[in-house]
Amino acid sequence: MSTEEFGACRRLAIAQATDGSIMDICQDGGVVTALLLYALETKLIDGAVVSGIKESKPCFPNPLLATTAREIMKCSGTRYFYSPNILALNEAVRQKKTSLAFVGTPCQIQAVRKAQKAGYKLVSPVKYLIGLMCSECFTYEGLMEKHLHRALGLNLSSIRKMNIKGKMLVTTDSGVHTIPLADIKQYARESCRRCSDFSSELADVSAGGLGMNGWTFVVIRTEKGAELFDTAEKMGIIRTRDVKEEPNAMNLLCSLSRRKKKGPIG
């Protein structure tokens, strides 16, 4: 294991889910969804703490304890707004779950690790921490309501997917709308400016798109994470490529990690 500028690292991989149904709905390579489904099916976990979508509010994140494959699939994709996933641990305790995967942003991964170290019972069921790479989240009122709806005239209920690839790509029923990041920077959450962790350095496995289409950049950090990822690969749940095939993604991982560590930006 080595220590890089993006944290501890046992292995780096470019990965993709092999299940076409996952690829149809996923954000990038579907790796997080594939790992969760594999872990649930093989009973490595009895639930996953993830971010769903509030039915009454388009694209609005909702913390959820997913206990079925259908629920995990339904939560596939990224919401660019803060989802307090830790709150779903209360439901896990209520249901007496004993082995969970927790999916969250760097700040949430840090919070769970600290709670584990302190011995809090709330996080005792958490077995795997899967971290999402994150530069910042936006306020729902600013990005969705003020900019996308009022300024650009988009019907929020028609939005099917949002992604960032050097710019924000908003896929609606009528097509893909491209929005310069400079136009939406003002809606970033203030607290995100003070975060120094881009790649979820305390996770067992970290994942992010890093500008790629249809593939996920994965940082395997711990022995537990390596066992999960490597076994899923051997079982054909995911396929991998060498990171040397995507030098731009590697460069972006390093540059964004450095940028976050420098302190408040923007």
Image (cartoon, grey):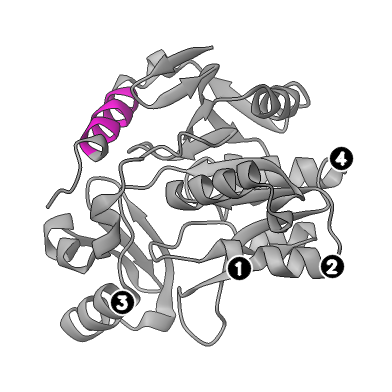
Q: In the image, what residue occupies the spot 75% across and 21% down?
A: 234
Disc nearer the start of the sequence (4/3): 4
> In this figure, which residue is indicated by the disc labeled 3?
144
* Mark 2 vs mark 4, CA separation in Å: 20 Å
Q: CA distance from mark 1 to mark 3?
A: 23 Å
Amino acid carrying mark 3 in the image:
Met
Q: Which residues are magenta?
A: 248-259
SS for callout 2: loop
For disc 4, the marked residue is: 42
Cα–Cα gap, marks 2 and 1:
14 Å
Among the two numbered marks 2 and 1 on one chain, the one whose residue lies closer to the N terminus = 1
Q: Residue 30, can we see it?
A: no
On screen, residue 196 above or below 163:
above
Mark 2 packing: few (<14 Cα in 10 Å), some, or many (20+)? few
Q: Which mark is residue 95?
A: 2
Say which label, 3 or 2, has the lower sequence index: 2
Q: Are marks 3 and 2 in contact (CB under 8 Å)?
A: no
Q: Which residue has dot 1 on it?
A: 87
Element type where label 4 sits in the image: loop
